Amino acid sequence: MQFSSNPKIALRVNGASYECQIDARTTLLDLLREHLQLTGSKKGCNFGECGACTVHLNGRRVNACLVLAAAAESDVTTIEGLAENGRLHPVQQAFIDQDAFQCGYCTPGQVMSAVALIREGHATTPAEIREWMSGNICRCSSYPQIVAAIEAVLAQEKGT
Amino acid sequence: METFAYARAANVVEALAQGAVPETAFLAGGTELLNWLRLGIAKPARLIDIARLDGLADIARLPNGGLRIGALARLNDVALNDIVAGEYPVLSRAILKSASAQLRNLATVGGNPLQKTRCGYFRAEDILPCTARHESTLAPFQGVKHATTPSGRRRPME
C-alpha cells in the first residue's frame, strides 16, 4: 500500500482522460473546478447538503464535495458532458422550456440529479419526483417548474 | 483541512494491518469523514481507502434464514435490493427516508452507525468549547454555562 500526500491520479471526465498530481485533500469538486476548469459543478454548501455539486460517478449521482478526488479514479460525468454535438440534453432543454430556474446556481446540480433520477426509474409521480430530487436545494424555489421539466421529459420519452 | 497521506487498500488483511497504525482512519463512503476533516473533528495523518475492497458490499441470504449485508454496501443499494425491499420493507423505507439520493449512493451501511453527534456546537465551523469535541477542554471554566441533558451528557447552553 502506497501512502501519498500528493497522489498521482487518473480518471475519465466527460469521455476525456486526465492524469494529474494533486494534494490528497482535494475533493472531486475542487479537482473539477480548480484543476480541470470545469466550473459547471457548483460549490454551494461544501457539506453534502445542497446538491449544487451533483455529478455522476460511474453513472451514479453523488455530491462531488463529499468524494476525495483520489478516491474518484473512475468515470465522471459533469453538466459539461451532457450535451451532444451542440445539442442540449433533453433535461437541459426541458429546464429552459419549463422555466425551471431563476438565478441558475443550483441548476447544474438539479439537471444532473434529474438525468440520474429518470435513469433510475424512480420518477413516476410528482410526489416521487419531489422526494428523489430532495437532495437538490433551490433557494429561488423553482421546485414546481423543476418537477414540470422532469415530467415533460418523461412524457416525451413515453411518446417516442 | 490538515494534510494527510492517502492510500487505497488492496485487501482486507493489508487494510487491517495498516489501519492499526496510530493516526490512521478508514475511508469508505466519505460522507461523514470528509466533513469531519473539514471541521477539524478528525485529523488523521493517514487515510486508507477501503471502498473498493472486494466482497464487502454483497447482500446475500444466510443458509439459516436472515440476510447478510456487507459493510461496504451503499445505502441505496441496500434499500433497493429486491430481497430487502420485498422482505424487509421497514429497513428499506427507513433507509430511503434518510439523507438524499446522492448521499445514499455514497454512504455505506457500515459507516452509517459510525456517524458522530449532530450537535451544532460539536459540528460548528468555529471551534467552540465543546467537551465532546475536545475532551481536555475546560469549557466550564471558560465562562460557558452547561446543562445536563436527559441522557446525562453535559452540553453548553447559550
Image: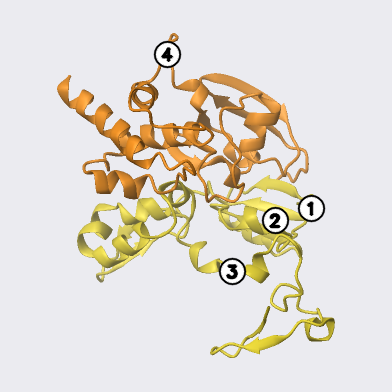
Residue A38 sits above or below residue B128 on the image: above
Residue A120 sits above or below residue B127 on the image: above
Dot 2: what SS? helix
The residue positioned 63% from the left and 55% from the top of the image is: B35
**At which x and y percent is residue A88?**
40, 16
Q: Dot 4 falls on which chain?
A: A
The 10 Å Cα crowd at callout 3, few under 14, some 14 to 19, many 20 or more, is some
| Residue type of the residue flagged with mark 3 | Lys
Asked if labels 3 and 2 share a chain, the reply is yes
Residue B36, quarter of the rendered image? bottom right
Q: Which of A67 and A141 is in front in this view?
A: A141
Task: Identify residue for label 3.
Answer: B116
Task: Identify residue for label 4.
Answer: A84
Task: Identify residue for label 2.
Answer: B37
Q: Dot 2 falls on which chain?
A: B
Do the CB atoms of the residues marked 1 and 4 lie less than 8 Å apart?
no
Give the colour scheme shown: by chain
The chain painted orange is A
Residue B53 is tagged as: none
